[in-house]
Amino acid sequence: MGEELSGLSIKELQNLESRLEMSLRGVRTKKDQILMDEIQELNRKGNLIHQENVELYKKVNLICRENMEMYKKIEAYGAGNINGVNRDYLRTNGLGIVEESNVPVHLQLSQPQQQNYDTQARATKLGYNFLHMTSI
């Protein structure tokens, strides 16, 4: 490019330069618009992720409070068995809570697991029955 410019007059060269500058401005404007659109999209996604993070944080705190309440109910019934359920069994199956509630929670993202919704519904019903029985 530029090898065949030797035969052009000053006026033709200035005209060519002007056209090249206008073309370059158009290319830069288009590039800037594409980059701005990408930045806006990334900001939108970032805001969605932040909102999801806030919601998950609320859920984790709610679950921690519910677990602490359940632990306190279990502790209120004293040592040994509670309605025929061994306390050690409850702790080893995820129903025990560490005394210190200010211990940081470390979460990791993982692939979603295939869930059996029938089993999940039964577990929810069993949890309700347990809570209902302990509140009586």
Image (cartoon, rainbow, N blue to C red):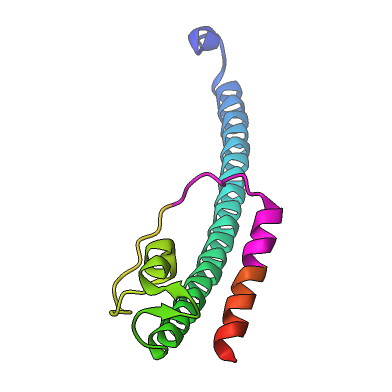
Q: Give 22 or 17, whichever is nearer the viewer.
A: 22
Read off the magenta span. Answer: 109-124
The count of marks equals 0
State the image quarter where residue 104 is shown. bottom left
Q: Residue furthest front?
A: 84
Query: Which residue is found at the position 69% from the left and 62% from the top?
Result: 121
Residue 12 part of the magenta-drawn span: no
Residue 73 location (% of width, % of height): 45, 87
Residue 110 part of the magenta-drawn span: yes
State the image quarter where residue 35 is shown. top right
Quarter occupied by the C terminus: bottom right
Query: Which residue is found at the position 62% from the left and 44% from the top?
Result: 114
- 61 with respect to 36 (left or right): left
- Residue 70 position (above or below residue 120): below
Residue 22 location (% of width, % of height): 62, 36
Query: Which residue is found at the position 38% from the left and 68% from the top?
Result: 91
State the image quarter where residue 8 is shown. top right
- 72 with respect to 41 (left or right): left
Query: Which residue is found at the position 58% from the left and 81% from the top?
Result: 131
Residue 42 location (% of width, % of height): 55, 52
- Residue 92 position (above or below residue 54): above
Residue 30 location (% of width, % of height): 63, 41
